[in-house]
Image: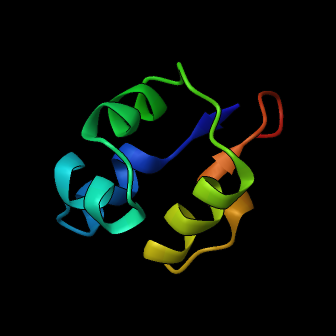
Amino acid sequence: MNNRIKELRARHNLTQEELARLVNVRRETIVFLEKNRYVPSLKLAYDISKVFALPIEEVFVFAGER
């Protein structure tokens, strides 16, 4: 699964630390997500999508769908 977190974070002028605080995880979790080394829980995916005001499927993309 790929994601657009880094791109969206930049567009919203958020640091990794700020996004982590907004979704109640450690900054390292955001780092791993951005590097596609961690698959988030449904709740975390929902929370991140909510921060960017986008549907989950516009933030997280299964490989081959994009």
Q: Is residue 52 visible?
A: no
Specify whether 32 is left or right of 54: left
Q: Is 8 placed above or below 41 here?
A: below
- What residue is rendered at 71% in x and 43% in y? 61
Residue 5: give x, y in percent of width and height.
44, 48
Of the 4 image quadrants, the one containing the C terminus is top right
* Image location of residue 44, percent across then percent down: 58, 55
Colour approach in the figure: rainbow
Query: Is residue 28 shown left or right of residue 5?
Result: left
Q: Quadrant of residue 62?
A: top right
Compared with 14, 34 (above or below) is: above
Q: Residue at x 53, y 24 (%)?
A: 36
* Count of residue discs: 0
Identify the residue at horizontal 44%, vertical 74% (top origin).
51
Residue displayed at 74% across by 59% down: 57
Dividing the picture into quadrants, the one containing residue 49 is bottom right
Q: Is residue 54 positioned above or below 29 on the image?
A: below
- Looking at this view, name the residue that lies furthest to the right: 65
Q: Is residue 49 visible?
A: yes
Q: Quadrant of the N terminus?
A: top right
Q: Is 15 placed left or right of 26 in the picture?
A: left
Q: Nearer the viewer, residue 61 or 23?
A: 23
Q: Position of residue 42 (x, y in %)?
A: 73, 54
Determine the residue located farthest toward the bottom in the rendered image. 53
Asked if residue 31 lies left or right of residue 38, the reply is left
